């Protein structure tokens, strides 16, 4: 059973990277990915802070973009103390641990995102996740450092490893869509929406794009469903001779024009 991938987005201090690696190994997590870190994973201060978990740091992979860091994952969980302005499922670390084990048992690759120390994940980054994880703590003071947040998630995953999953989804031979497939669909859909003018309001465009992405993320799409959606975009954008859509403005205009032609025609009776 594969363990979840830990993804640190724009971490700022080498010590925090090292302590996060130490927390990971405490819980049997070994795959670490960094997105644009301020300091490298093998920095001497990170190695020192990791104690005997420096192997996690030496095998860590670094990426220039979050898209690239999660492209081969099937599910992504975003840890964020604040609920962003979007429709997104919100679960506890314990519920997330159950889901992570169920996904791993099905041969799927999940990952957990952690944002930078000062600001946490940005809205655009949270929008790439399937669900958001909120750690229930004292509402008057719920501040955790990066390593603490990694330890909470890792601990719940480790404790749940022998439990039966609370939820199952019968998928037969279907394979969950990878983030790379989903991101490719997003780019094509957004290009089509730009071309047709749906995203013409540049002030609202970022929010609309995030909401559209969040909507598809919640669906838990399979790989073959992404192919179907790609075909739908093709049908809507590359078939100029297609019949008007019933109920659309074009269809109504065509019907009205036909009625006007009938009234203006000569009677043959």
Image (spheres, helix red, strand yellow):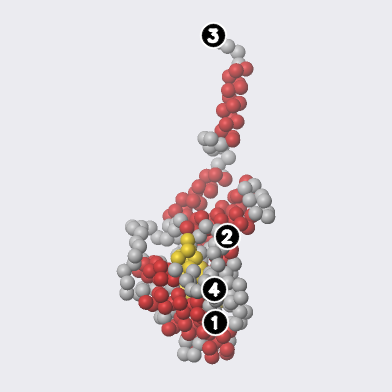
Earlier in the chain: of badge 3 and badge 2, it is 2
Residue 187: horizontal and vertical position, in percent? 57, 57
User: Residue beneath label 3, please?
Assistant: 269
Callout 4: few (<14), some (14-19), or many (20+) C-alpha neighbours within 10 Å? few
Q: Are marks 3 and 2 in contact (CB under 8 Å)?
A: no
Position of 131 with respect to 198 (left or right) is left
Tag shown at residue 140: 4
Q: Nearer the viewer, mark 4 or mark 1?
A: 4
Q: For the point 40% across and 74% down, which residue is it?
A: 157
- Mark 1, residue position: 17
| Mark in the foreground, 3 or 4 | 4
Q: Nearer the viewer, residue 251 or 223?
A: 251
Q: How many tags in the picture? A: 4
Gap between marks 3 and 4 measured at Cα? 85 Å
- On screen, residue 259 versus residue 162, left or right, reads right
**Closer to the camera, 124 or 61?**
124
- Give the residue at mark 2: 85
Camera-side mark, 4 or 2: 4
> Real-space Cα distance between discs 3 and 1?
88 Å
Secondary structure under tag 4 reads: loop
Q: Nearer the viewer, mark 3 or mark 1?
A: 1
The span from disc 4 to disc 2 (Cα, nearest Å) is: 21 Å
């Amino acid at each position: 059973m594969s363990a979840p991938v830990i993804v640190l987005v724009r971490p700022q201090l080498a010590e925090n990277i090292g302590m996060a690696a130490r927390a990971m190994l405490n819980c049997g997590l070994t795959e670490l990915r960094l997105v644009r870190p301020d300091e490298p994973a093998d920095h001497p201060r990170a190695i020192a802070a990791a104690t005997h978990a420096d192997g996690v740091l030496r095998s860590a992979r670094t990426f220039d973009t979050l898209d690239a860091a999660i492209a081969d994952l099937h599910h992504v969980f975003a840890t964020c103390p604040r609920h962003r302005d979007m429709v997104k499922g919100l679960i506890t670390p314990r519920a997330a641990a159950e889901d992570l084990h169920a996904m791993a048992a099905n041969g799927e690759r999940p990952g957990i995102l952690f944002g930078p120390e000062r600001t946490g994940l940005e809205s655009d980054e949270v929008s790439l996740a399937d669900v958001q994880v909120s750690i229930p703590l004292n509402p008057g003071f719920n501040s955790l450092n990066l390593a603490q947040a990694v330890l909470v998630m890792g601990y719940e995953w480790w404790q749940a490893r022998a439990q039966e999953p609370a939820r199952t989804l019968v998928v037969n031979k279907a394979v969950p869509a990878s983030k790379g497939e989903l991101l490719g669909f997003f780019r094509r859909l957004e290009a089509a929406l730009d071309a047709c003018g749906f995203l013409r309001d540049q002030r609202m465009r970022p929010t609309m794009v995030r909401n559209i992405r969040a909507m598809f993320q919640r669906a838990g799409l399979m790989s073959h469903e992404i192919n179907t959606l790609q075909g739908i975009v093709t049908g809507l954008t590359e078939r100029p001779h297609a019949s008007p859509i019933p109920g659309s403005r074009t269809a109504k205009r065509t019907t009205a024009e036909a009625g006007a032609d009938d009234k203006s025609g000569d009677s043959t009776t």
